[in-house]
Amino acid sequence: MSFTLHGLAVSHGIAIGHAHLVSHALLEVEHYVLPGRYVDEEIVRFDEAVAEVQGELDALMAGADAHAPSELTAFIDLHQMLLADPMLIEATRDQIRERRCNAEWALVQQMEHIVEQFEQIEDAYLRERKADIVQVVERVLKVLMGHPGHPPKHGRGESLIVVAHDLSPADTIQFKQLKIGGFVTDLGGATSHTAIVARSLAIPAVVGLHHARELIREDDLLIVDGTRGVLIVDPDARVLEEYRLRRSALELERAKLKRLKKARAATLDGAEVELAANIELPGDVAQAKAVEAAGVGLYRTEFLFLNRDGMPGEEEQYEAYRSVAEAMNGRPVVIRTLDIGADKNLRGVERLEANPALGQRAIRYCLAEPQVFLAQLRAILRASHHGRVRILVPMLAHAHEIEQTLALVGQAKEQLRARGHPFDEGIEVGGMIEIPAAALALGVFLKRLDFLSIGTNDLIQYTLAIDRTDEAVAHLYDPLHPAVLRLIAQTIEAGRRAGLPVAVCGEMAGDPQLTRLLLGMGLRQFSMHPAQILEVKQEVLRSDLARLRRKVARLLATDDPGRLRQGLERLKAI
Ligand code: PEP
Ligand code: MG
């Protein structure tokens, strides 16, 4: 039966495909449909993997000497039993046969099914046994992944729509490797990092759907309208056709925009505008170059720290940063220091803070862990020898944080000099303006730093006291609130007067509806996901700066949201 759910539109476009219900574990497993002739072979591959794990467990049992604690042998016993359980093994074989899917995926599907049943059990001891099922499955998966099967050469998982209760930024970043068509979640806000990653992947997404994970079944046909925030389940033929047409029209629009790639980004009256790219991983540079981004305006380095045990060391970070600096070939690269905390957590060090967004996040974490910070600073400094690198520090609010940061940059430089590593002695250090206190007391930022970058996502969150990841208050998250606009405009103006470059790197910079407003405030440096650059460039090319400035100045004087929105509409006609 066809039905529609409404949520928050977080990543534009239309995706049509089949539902793939996931939990966190599933994301690491690839899904593909096997050509019929490989199905029997796949079952043999699965059986062999199970046999190999059985062998491992037998060896463990044999190796446990007479003095081994009884818990250990009981645990091995239990795992051996689970590995022989038809609910897990026979049912996985059936899935492979019936769905013609790869063994890894069939196994995790079956695990999910069993785990769900365990969650209903009242007895706490038995409920806890689901962890054992997960461990056994992980063992088999490890073996399977060491002996890959026959994925088809084309179209792996292309039309899969991921349906989840919630996804962390760490989960979503994995979509980069998995080729997901779109995703929908029950929870989440429009500028959560999960949504930001979706936009960077240019895959349609709707979040805040409340009950999608409950109502949708595996393989249901779905339409994700990431522009309107609509999810249609099991659409009828007419609706499906309508959306196919819309999707083609959107693709055509995108293809047309490509013609702007080489055009100089300048307004009608000749003002040059810098349109740089936000990236999360070194691999994203290709996308930035494909649209001729002026540089990397925000490299969110924390993604290098997610989805792993332990932190990347100085060498690994240096390699990553250097690869970006080199690939950008002389264009500026702004590397942001670790912004961990809030919705991005290191594996194993999740803290139980009541309000993580107000807790030890970003620079607060780095100053509390100076060895981690110094290693990153050394890695960035060393990369500065291979390109035009700048350092950007998130979440600054206090003068002493700026002083401490600069002292640590000095210390990292000393350490590199002592080691004989070359770096850019004059490397510029900038600060993000994303806490209202920083925007209201800019003096020390202007005096001590080389450039500023306004993080509107957090500036809105902290100005309006809205958790950006919480869909329950998403309707109050308003980039056009007069207080937000004034803080942005003041910062741009103060930077202009002091002769300090100011950029905007939050999501507002990539919203073509807001391009004219920001230009009218005097902004000349925008940084956004590469997928949004050409659309924003189109707006820049159509704008007349002199006229915009006057209109925007008047707009900023009003506190009336209605008049503000009308005024914004009128800017489109300029
Ligand atoms: C911001 O806050 O606007 C920003 C660019 O940083 P992030 O979204 O990574 O917090
Ligand atoms: Mg931020």
Image (spheres, rainbow, N blue to C red):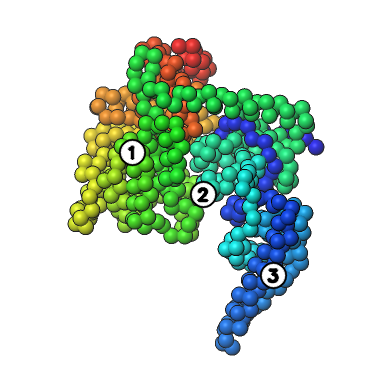
For image coordinates 37% across by 55% down, the residue present is: 316
Residue under numbered circle 1: 329
Which mark, by number, is residue 83? Answer: 3
Above or below, 120 against 267 in this view is: below
For image coordinates 70% across by 42% down, the residue present is: 18
Above or below, 130 against 439 in this view is: below
Residue type pointed to by label 2 = Ala
Residue type pointed to by label 1 = Asn
Residue type pointed to by label 3 = Leu
CB under 8 Å between discs 3 and 2: no
Q: Is 79 situated left or right of 487 in this image?
A: right
Under tag 3, what secondary structure? Answer: helix
For image coordinates 41% across by 31% down, the residue present is: 292
Rendered image quadrant of residue 80: bottom right
Residue under numbered circle 2: 170
Q: Is 181 situated left or right of 312 in this image?
A: right
Which mark, by number, is residue 405? Answer: none
Alpha carbon of mark 1 to alpha carbon of mark 3: how far? 53 Å
